[in-house]
Amino acid sequence: MSSKNSKQRNNARNHSVKNQKNAAAQSQRSASSGVAQNGLDRFFHITERGSTVGREIRGGFVTFFSMAYILVINPIILSSALPENISTQAVAAGTALVAGIMTVLMGVVANYPLGLAAGMGLNAMVAFTLVGASGLTFQEAMGLIVWEGILITILVLTGFREAVFKAVPRQLKTAISVGIGLFIAFVGLLNAGIIRPGGTPVQLGVDGSLDGWPAVIFVFGLFLTIILYVRKVRGAILIGILSSTVLAIIIQAFVKIGQKSDENPTGWGQSVPEIDGAPVAFPQFSSLFQVDMFGAFGKLGPLAVILLVFSLMLADFFDTMGTMVAVGAEGDLLDEKGNPPRSKQILLIDSVSAMAGGMGGVSSNTSFIESAAGVGEGARTGLASVVTGCLFLVSTFLAPIVNLVPTEAASTALVFVGFLMMVQVTDMEWHKPEIAIPAFLTIAFMPFAYSISVGIGVGFIAYTAIQIAIGKARRIHPLMWVVSILFVAYFALGPIQRALLG
């Protein structure tokens, strides 16, 4: 009897174990077959895309820390263009607010693991081309950003984006990104005082030497970022900025260097790394709605405004197309034609982000290639974007920390991002002069003319002229004809105005 009971208990135990294994196997099959486990899973298609909630949260954090440098960099780039009523703290808070809202929308509406924030290159164009070179006010420049966002949104809604995308040769699109990279790197070196005006147009440091603690901070931050990057450490740019900032605060506490001036050429640049008050405070949003939609038309004329908006659109539009495809490829999210899911929604949110950036007074917002870092950590859905966006929203309370970051520490990111954009130069077909020459001129004129739009214009004109010269005028897209002619008029605007005015 005892033996029989024991046998029954063993059978029951084996049956229970078998049932548990079957249940586990069934759960695993459900996950692998794409059967959603709960409402969150069903909304974001987490299991369907081979991910988990934990991976999405982790990926969202990684994307945020890979992008967070923009909270420091954007205010510094825009600082030279800011009016007196807008502080860098306000720009930092506005940058975080707009990035947070639009990234959450990307997750909820497009269900794609993309983070959005103020675009590098676009912010430089605002500060140095629209305000610096063209003489627009900050509000007028933001008005052009809004117009650019409206134009891109119309292109998306009408489907005309395909025509614009196909109008510009792929090599010129690549050249635009590479040229912006060199321009950003040049700006970073100038802001950090590593490159300065001198006996020659520019020179290394002070009289040809790197002199002063701020230069040490820049070199330390740049090489730390490089070392972390080559060792594949996530968030290398942010770590480099924060580490060099901490070192700068320590040095300033003991040495009291002061701000750079003619009498103090080895001082700090635009900000002195000193703690002044609490690092956490209620956010200031004075940059919001600082927009003048029509002032630029009266100041520059319709032709110049159209070309400037078109230049902004090019710098924004094609970067977005490349970014969403690159992120999708990293996460194996592309279809057989190489398109990501919900492409129209992705492009629509990105386009609205451009308008939101202008209305927020923080420059055009766009998709960040750094999102690939989060995808590399396992993110596959919009839940990761929601996590990233929420972290940006929390960051609005950390805007005072921006004042602690010296230009020399933040500029390391500009130089390094320049490298990241430069690596695309390997995609160029340098053995084909009809393509290589316009691409080279595009790349060269951006830093040398200190203008992104000038580089784009020179490249377009050169491409059109060369295609005509080699008997391939029929290959030129009608839109390229129109834009090239407009750029010719833009470059000759001064003589044309003098001739018309007598």
Image: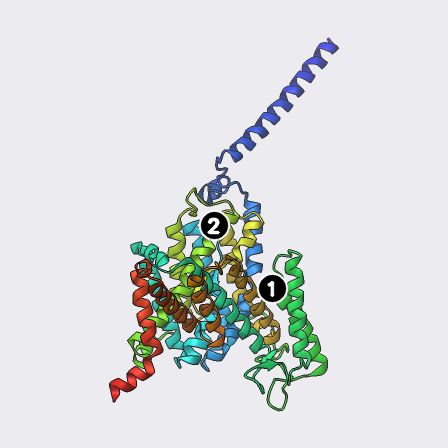
* Local secondary structure at mark 2: helix
Res. 463 in view: yes
Q: Position of residue 133 (x, y in %)?
A: 42, 80
Position of residue 469 in the picture relative to residue 373 (left or right): left
- The quadrant holding residue 474 is bottom left
The numbered mark at residue 12 is none
Q: Which residue is mark 1?
A: 238
- The quadrant holding residue 275 is bottom right
Q: Position of residue 111 (x, y in %)?
A: 44, 49
* Local secondary structure at mark 1: helix
Q: Nearer the viewer, mark 1 or mark 2?
A: 1
Q: Tag 1: residue type?
A: Leu
Q: Tag 2: residue type?
A: Gly
Closer-to-camera residue (103/239):
239
Please give the name of the residue rendered at 72% of the width and 80% of the height, measured from the top-left corner.
254
The numbered mark at residue 382 is 2
The tag earlier along the polypeptide, 1 or 2, is 1
Closer-to-camera residue (144/176):
176
Q: Position of residue 66 (x, y in %)?
A: 57, 59
